[in-house]
Image (tube, rainbow, N blue to C red):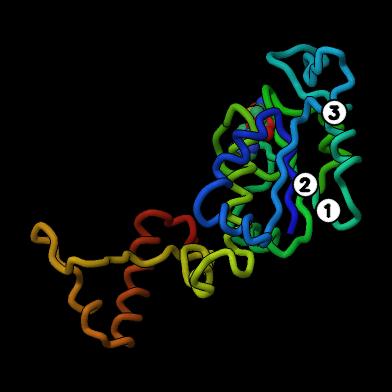
Amino acid sequence: MRIDIVTLFPEVALAPLSDSIIRRARAAAIVEVVGHQLRDWSEDKHRRVDDSPCGGGQGMLLKPEPLFAAVEELRRPETRVILMTPQGRPFKQAMARELAGQEHLLILCGHYEGVDHRVVETLVDEEVSIGDYVLTNGALAAAVVCDAVIRLLPGALGDERSPLDESFSDPRRLEAPAYTRPVEFRGLAVPEVLLSGHHGKIHAWKEENALARTRRNRPDLLE
Ligand code: SAH
């Protein structure tokens, strides 16, 4: 898989993808991630990429020309072009799985008040939001999407089984609480059943506690 990220802050987008599991996946060529500076496609002599909104209003927007030039240079027939925006479809584990099946993602990041709408209308396959809050720019949001997608690629996680049984593997269920040693810590004991070696009972305990946790923290998932 290849992922290109076009942003004003390539170092911000790449920093979270340069350590630990994702760094190793990149080193093992499971994925190639390339950050691009949007200003490299500016034709302005001051490398400007923004302008004020038509009709007035606060702030600045990214102009269409550099984004169109970037996409036209980097896009291939199989490319999925994604725009990071709080106005997009909510990014969920199901979307991460779907994107992990693609050959090439081209992720566009906004800044200031966002991007000229002609980019959305004609250049982008999918507008994606990482949550109901507003960031200063799309670089961190792109890194979030990349991290969630890359860890699902075959070979990225040491234990191949781990992405099968975790929060959102079933979209209506969080993972059950988990404990490690010591079995007693500051008077707090690990639940007996988890030490019993009885797989049936352990499974039932996890089911019950996964549901209890979901009900408490994310009742919306059960609706
Ligand atoms: N004016 C816009 C907010 C722009 S935030 C509005 O009111 O909706 C600036 C940029 O940060 C966006 O273009 C986008 O690329 C990125 N961004 C901010 N919040 C985001 C989120 N929740 N998900 C994805 N990208 C986000």
Does mark 3's beta carbon lie closer than 8 Å to ligand 1? no
Residue at the image position 52 percent from the left and 57 percent from the top = 21
Disc 1 residue type? Thr
Q: Earlier in the sequence, mark 3 or mark 2?
A: 3
Q: Which residue is mark 2?
A: 106
- Residue 179 in percent (x, y) is at 27, 66
| Numbered disc 3: secondary structure | helix
Q: Which residue is mark 3?
A: 41
Residue at the image position 18 percent from the left and 66 percent from the top = 182
| Numbered disc 2: secondary structure | strand
Q: As displayed, is residue 11 above or below residue 27?
A: above
- What mark, if any, has residue 150 been given in the picture? none
Answer with the quarter of the image where residue 186 lies: bottom left
Does mark 1's beta carbon lie closer than 8 Å to ligand 1? no
Q: Quadrant of ligand 1?
A: top right
Answer with the quarter of the image where residue 129 lies: top right
Q: Earlier in the sequence, mark 1 or mark 3?
A: 3
Answer with the quarter of the image where residue 29 lies: bottom right
Instruction: Using a 10 Å C-alpha cutoff, classify the residue at mark 3 as few (fewer than 14 neighbours), some (14 to 19) or many (20 or more).
Output: some
- Contact, CB < 8 Å: mark 2 with mark 1? yes
Q: CA distance from mark 1 to mark 3?
A: 19 Å
Residue at the image position 62 percent from the left and 41 percent from the top = 14
Q: CA distance from mark 3 to mark 2?
A: 15 Å
Q: Which residue is mark 1?
A: 79
Q: As displayed, is residue 161 above or below residue 83?
A: below
Disc 3 residue type? Trp
- Residue 203 in percent (x, y) is at 35, 81
Q: Quadrant of the N terminus?
A: bottom right
Q: As displayed, is residue 198 above or below residue 101?
A: below
Instruction: Using a 10 Å C-alpha cutoff, classify the residue at mark 2 as few (fewer than 14 neighbours), some (14 to 19) or many (20 or more).
Output: many
| Numbered disc 1: secondary structure | strand
